[in-house]
């Protein structure tokens, strides 16, 4: 079993920055993808960014150029640096870990709230 614990959410003004962290503990399999999803009120959960344990990344079009995902494999931790934040980035942000090899288990964190408002 794997546990994911997020931190770093909060209230920030438009144009500001936040850094989210997600630490994985437990039986973490080396080959995996860690990512961040978000869900705004009344909307479906959507992918924000994800990073493979070998380093490849991909981003939602809405955050490309503003957000940067990174990971520290030694610490089983993924980060999301969010710059130039907009009110539409307001959402609950969830960390995700997907094991690549079968049975390809997937784990979710409890979520951290990000509010962008003046």
Image (tube, rainbow, N blue to C red):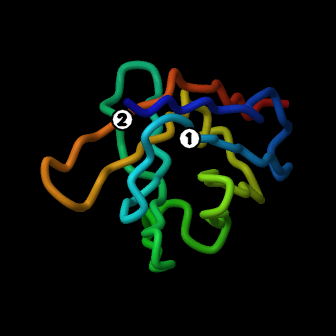
> Is 12 on the left or on the right of 111, as rendered?
right
Q: Earlier in the sequence, mark 2 or mark 1?
A: 1
- The image shows residue 94, relative to residue 97, as above or below, that is above
Which mark is on residue 107? Answer: 2
Quarter location, residue 107: top left
In percent of width and height, residue 16 lies at: 86, 49
Q: Residue at x 55, y 30 (%)?
A: 91
Q: Quadrant of the N terminus?
A: top left
Location of residue 92 with respect to 56 vertically, above or below = above
Q: CA distance from mark 2 to mark 1?
A: 10 Å
97, above or below 109, in the image? below
Q: Is residue 81 left or right of residue 30?
A: right
Q: Nearer the viewer, residue 31 or 118?
A: 31
Q: As rendered, which of 46 and 2 lies closer to the eye?
A: 2
Picture coordinates of residue 90 (x, y %)? 61, 33
Tags 2 and 1 in contact by the CB under 8 Å rule? yes
Identify the disc placed on residue 24: 1
On screen, residue 65 versus residue 98, left or right, reads right
Number of numbered markers: 2
Q: Quadrant of the C terminus?
A: top right
* Residue at (55% x, 61% y) in the render: 63
Q: Secondary structure at mark 1?
A: strand
- Disc 2 crowd rating (10 Å Cα; few below 14, some 14-19, many 20+) is some
Q: Is residue 5 left or right of residue 118?
A: left
Secondary structure of residue under mark 2 = strand
The residue drawn where x is 43% and y is 40% is 27
């Amino acid at each position: 079993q794997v546990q994911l614990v997020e931190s770093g959410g909060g209230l920030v003004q438009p144009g500001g920055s936040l850094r989210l962290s997600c630490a994985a503990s437990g039986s973490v399999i080396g080959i995996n993808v860690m990512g961040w999803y978000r869900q705004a009120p009344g909307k479906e959960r959507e992918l924000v960014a994800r990073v493979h344990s070998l380093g490849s990344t991909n981003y939602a079009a809405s955050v490309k150029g503003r957000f940067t995902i990174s990971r520290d494999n030694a610490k089983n931790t993924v980060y999301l640096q969010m710059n130039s934040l907009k009110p539409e980035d307001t959402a609950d942000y969830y960390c995700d870990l997907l094991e690549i090899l079968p049975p390809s288990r997937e784990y979710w964190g409890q979520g951290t709230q990000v509010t962008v408002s003046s």
